[in-house]
């Protein structure tokens, strides 16, 4: 009783954002390294959103799974009205569901090379040793894609590629197209992490060569996040993200105290997978450790938490 009476970190459905992988395939496809997570056809994604919204979960972030044949060097399929993210946004809006829809805005799910932006000399066969992201061209297509996602019904666009200048470019493009009310959640503080491994299976966005260290942060640097954060805030980010969450609780805490916009912690795929793996072996109690972990992210200072545990947390928190 006393423990409950003096507890002062709270977790509820309104803190949670649930990631969904939407596919143009026709079948629900389980993601092996993320038990309980599936690639969902549009209709199934809709059913999931409706079911969870009825239980009080109101925030969803969409990632697109793109068939290989639709991928190209510039990720143009992201703008296609048949792309599953765009279809799902339209379906949610036309049904009038009272939910907040975030659209991940990155090209790694759409490019044939798997990088988060357009590369220099895309006409030449990409060679592992000479790739480099063409920042300015990427900004241009990020702006265009944000406008398309907003047009299909995204309430928030979430650029996750750590491309320099992305927030300003997207804000400019959205405003010019009359989408002033669409917010930007920037993945401002994103570390180059091996904990993203299972996500790359789920999103089928693994790189064909190279790595993301050129545009994601090095975890051995203490203060680099300040520059990224200041840049994004100055360009108009409405919310900022720290990712991963569990291994970066110190950063969440510092980001929270150094800005006034909402801070989002992303409890990423590898962090989810490791709790599941230990739980399956009987080495850890899944429910207890998932709750403890999510509370820790909240306690560190996250206002919102993106987590694959969201549906289970709904049940566990109401038990
Ligand atoms: C792509 C993106 C990644 C994640 C979210 N958006 C992977 C990456 O940067 O390689 C990872 C999420 C997770 O691991 O759950 N820009």
Image (tube, grey):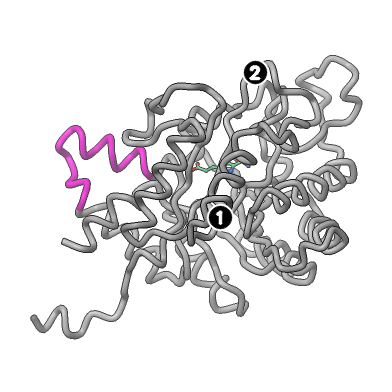
The kind of secondary structure element at disc 1 is strand
Residue 126 at x, y percent in the picture: 81, 19
- Drawn side of residue 241 relative to residue 298, left or right: right
Is 80 placed above or below 16 here? Answer: above
- Magenta residue span: 272-287
The local crowd at label 1, few if under 14, some if 14 to 19, many if 20 or more residues have their Cα within 10 Å, is many
Q: Is residue 228 above or below residue 122?
A: below
- Figure disc tally: 2
- The quarter of the rendered structure image containing the C terminus is bottom left
N-terminal label among 1 and 2 = 2
Q: Which of labels 1 and 2 is toward the front?
A: 1
Where residue 307 is drawn, which disc sits there? none
Q: Residue at x 66, y 69 (%)?
A: 238
What residue appears at the point 41 percent right and 51 percent down from the top-left corner?
307
Label 1 to label 2: alpha-carbon separation: 26 Å
Is-magenta flag for residue 278? yes
Q: What element carries label 2?
A: helix
Q: Residue 68 carries which label?
A: 2
Where residue 218 sits: x, y (%)?
A: 63, 49
Q: Mark 1 points at which residue?
A: 101
Image-based side of 308 in relation to 254, left or right:
left
Structural crowding at the residue carrying mark 2, measured as other residues with C-alpha within 10 Å and reported as few (<14), some (14–19) or many (≥20): few
Dividing the picture into quarters, in which one does residue 186 lie? bottom right
Image quadrant, ligand 1: top right
- Residue 107: horizontal and vertical position, in percent? 71, 37
- The foreground one among 145 and 120 is 145
- Displayed quadrant of residue 36: top left
Q: Which of 58 and 21 is in front in this view?
A: 58
Magenta span has 135?
no
Say which residue appears at 38% left-offset and 27% top-offset.
Answer: 30
Q: In which quarter of the image is the N terminus?
A: bottom left
């Amino acid at each position: 009783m006393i423990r409950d009476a003096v507890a002062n970190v709270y977790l509820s459905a309104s803190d949670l954002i649930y990631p969904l992988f939407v596919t143009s395939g026709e079948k629900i496809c389980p993601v092996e390294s993320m038990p309980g997570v599936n690639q969902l056809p549009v209709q199934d994604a809709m059913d999931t959103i409706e079911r969870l919204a009825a239980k009080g979960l109101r925030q969803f972030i969409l990632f697109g799974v793109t068939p290989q044949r639709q991928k190209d060097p510039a990720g143009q399929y992201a703008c296609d009205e048949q792309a599953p993210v765009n279809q799902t946004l339209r379906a949610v809006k036309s049904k009038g569901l009272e939910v907040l829809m975030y659209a991940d805005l990155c090209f790694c799910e759409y490019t044939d090379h798997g990088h988060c932006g357009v590369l220099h000399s895309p006409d030449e066969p990409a060679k592992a040793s000479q790739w480099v992201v063409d920042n300015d061209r990427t900004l241009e297509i990020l702006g265009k894609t944000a406008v398309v996602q907003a047009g299909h019904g995204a309430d928030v666009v979430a650029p996750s590629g750590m491309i320099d200048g992305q927030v300003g470019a997207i804000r400019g493009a959205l405003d010019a197209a009359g989408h002033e009310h669409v917010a930007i959640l920037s993945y401002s503080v994103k570390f180059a992490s091996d904990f993203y491994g299972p996500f790359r299976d789920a999103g089928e966005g693994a790189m064909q060569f190279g790595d993301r260290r050129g545009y994601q942060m090095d975890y051995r640097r203490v203060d680099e996040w300040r520059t990224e954060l200041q840049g994004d805030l100055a360009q108009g980010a409405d919310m900022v993200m720290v990712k991963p969450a569990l291994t970066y609780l110190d950063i969440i805490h510092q980001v929270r105290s150094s800005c006034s916009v909402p801070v989002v912690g992303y409890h990423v795929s590898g962090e989810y997978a490791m709790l599941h793996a230990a739980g399956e072996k009987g080495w850890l109690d899944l429910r207890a450790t998932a709750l403890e972990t999510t509370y820790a992210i909240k306690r560190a200072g996250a206002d919102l938490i993106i987590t694959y545990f969201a549906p289970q947390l709904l049940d566990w928190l109401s038990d």
